[in-house]
Image (cartoon, rainbow, N blue to C red):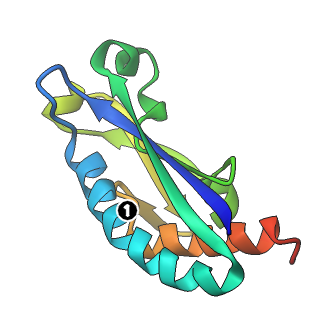
Amino acid sequence: MKTLNILWQRLVTPDGETCERCGGTQDAIVRAIPQLREALRPLGFEPVLETREIALDAFKGMPSESNRIWIAGRSIEDWLEASVGKSRCCSACGGEQCRTLEIGAETFEAIPEQLIVKAALLAARRVDGKP
């Protein structure tokens, strides 16, 4: 079985906390992985999730790197033909302008599971050589 690598990175404070939008994305990924296992199995793929933590000091220098997802080596915004935006976040982020995902007129602070699933299915088709 081929692997479909999914990488997600987010801020984690020294106290082990993360922001609400990263927490929301984490919940969505946890729900998406079992769906992807079922959907990808007939295609011969197994989703493999890797989670990376960004320390607070590193986050302050690159807040737009938090709450990022890559699937099969490409960003989720590439798979979904989305744009990256930013908006003020919560206390864990120190009020930084954190990453958002924009598709059409919609802006997502936490990345919903349906977008994660959609991007992964698009990636599996492309990796499998289908348009």
- Kindly identify the residue that appears in the image at 64 percent across and 65 percent down: 80
Report which quarter residue 35 is drawn in: bottom left
Is residue 31 found left or right of 85 in the rendered image? Answer: left
Q: Position of residue 25 (x, y in %)?
A: 33, 56
- Kindly identify the residue that appears in the image at 57 percent across and 69 percent down: 104
- Name the image quarter holding the N terminus: bottom right
Question: Which amino acid, by three-letter code, is at mark 1?
Answer: Ile
Mark 1 element type: helix
Vertical placement of residue 36 versus 48, above or below: below
- Kindly identify the residue that appears in the image at 65 percent across and 71 percent down: 45
Between 99 and 123, the one nearer to me in the picture:
123
Report which quarter residue 4 is drawn in: bottom right
Vertical placement of residue 50 versus 64, above or below: below
Vertical placement of residue 4 versus 96, above or below: below
- Kindly identify the residue that appears in the image at 36 percent across and 17 percent down: 60
Is residue 52 found left or right of 119 in the rendered image? Answer: left
Q: Which residue is mark 1?
A: 29
Is residue 127 found left or right of 54 in the rendered image? Answer: right
Would residue 43 be seen by someone viewing this image from the given angle?
A: yes
- Name the image quarter holding the C terminus: bottom right
